[in-house]
Image (cartoon, rainbow, N blue to C red):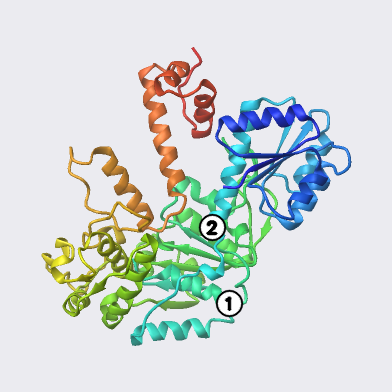
Amino acid sequence: MKPIWIVDDDASIRWVLEKALARENLATRSFASGREALAAFDSDSPQVLVSDIRMPGESGLDLLAAVKEKHPGLPVIVITAFSDLDSAVASFQGGAFEYLAKPFDIDKAVALIRRALEESLREASIDIAPSETPEILGQAPAMQEVFRAIGRLSQSNVTVLITGESGTGKELVARALHKHSPRAQQPFIALNTAAIPKDLLESELFGHERGAFTGAQAMRRGRFEQAENGTLFLDEIGDMPFDLQTRLLRVLSDGHFYRVGGHQPVKANVRVIAATHQNLEQRVRDGLFREDLYHRLNVIRLRLPSLRERREDIPILVRHFLVQSAHQLGVEPKRLSEEAQRFLSSLDLPGNVRQLENLCNWITVMAPGQTVEVKDLPRDLTQAQPAPPSTTAAAGAAVAVPAPTAGPLHADPAPAPAPGTDGWIGLLELQAARMLSDGQIEVMDVLGRQFESALIRTALKYTHGRKNDAAIRLGIGRNTITRKIAELGIDGAKDE
């Protein structure tokens, strides 16, 4: 992570912020003028920029304008005096993330910088360069049809609906459609609508205005704005709540939307690609999906075949995933014997390509020797009866494959640990594996917040709501627990 830059001609302000952020294990770099900071941008850049407004020479607003021109996604916090309201307004018009009014509370300043830091890291995690787009492999006739469809759609901005079983690679196809479209140099933003709680999904899609709800301390752009001029991929669209389907239909119809709590329409120039493993026609008949939205999305339908329909691709995929997994771990790639290849090609693999990739990760870690025989494969596969061809399953319901715990692998969740064996650690690993398998992002942040919230809530119950006592029991500082209670929205805490 890059350091936080502090720009202020007042050495005492720089010193206070440096020490406060150092206690939070956050690296800093300080500058006495805007001119020094601008010169430093020639060779480096920060994760967050904190700048005073009134400085000799380059003002904070001048610095803000210059930075936003070259680094539009960089969060900038400006420091201003209470009496300087015009500067505060001008800073927001210039694209500032938030402002600090002097004299400021140092704990609130650190909390604000942390929010800006989280926003910066979140923006970076979803901005994937086209060069990192994974390759789609397949020689089977069914896959060649998919490749031809991608080619035909290469110069089009038309809405595409991708269907297919879980694990067939719908997001890879969406990325390929974007990569070969006129929007290739613009953002590709992916959102799994089934992975976001209903109460947060509207804000995630459309953003929110400052003060729109409790905790909305700054304006936040939604995925539509992040994908401006690019492509927005909405995965598992069939699970979108019914009331939000109406808002999505409105955007697709007239190209405008409102942020949560906003009154000014925002224009959206975004190509939408949607995907689902569900039967949308049946969900329309069941009253769970709007028929007019279905027709808006179903302009061009692209169906991805299951692995059962392209068994001849399994050896190619296995070789690719074994090489990829070995590269991640820094080891020599393993090989399958001909018998093992035939055995894998005969399996139904209801988790499709994702399940096959997870299996190859397991083989790289767990299988003995460089040449892998059938007996070296997971017993859950070799002893289980093949699933019927008509089976369709979500990734989490795939044939059980032991999930390796070593290395940066993407494994399907293993069966739930028996009580008393792995305990809560095993349950945590299982939940993390499920979220990773579903393609969720920010897994560390989501689970980390849940973990911290559970600890603090339990400690507050134990101390009858006395947060100072709870902080002592947890081994954290009074300011830290106060900040966490506010960030996590925990009720029932009291000072005494």
What secondary structure is found at the residue carrying circle 1? loop
Q: Position of residue 406 (x, y in %)?
A: 31, 52
Q: Position of residue 241 (x, y in %)?
A: 44, 54
Q: Position of residue 453 (x, y in %)?
A: 42, 33
Vertical comparison of 40 with 52: above or below: below
Give the farthest residue toward the top: 496
Name which quarter of the figure residue 113 lies in: top right
Q: Closest to the observer: 300 or 127?
A: 127
Tell me, yes or no, if residue 381 can be seen here: yes
Name which quarter of the figure residue 451 lies in: top left
**Hey, what amino acid is under mark 1?**
Ser
Q: For the point 65% across and 26% down, which residue is it? A: 106
Q: Which mark is residue 181?
A: 1
Task: Name the N-terminal-most of marks 2 and 1.
Answer: 2
Q: Closest to the observer: 185 or 55?
A: 55
Q: Is residue 112 left or right of residue 237?
A: right
Vertical comparison of 204 with 382: above or below: above
Q: Is residue 256 left or right of residue 39?
A: left
Which residue corresponds to mark 2? 126
What secondary structure is found at the residue carrying circle 2? helix
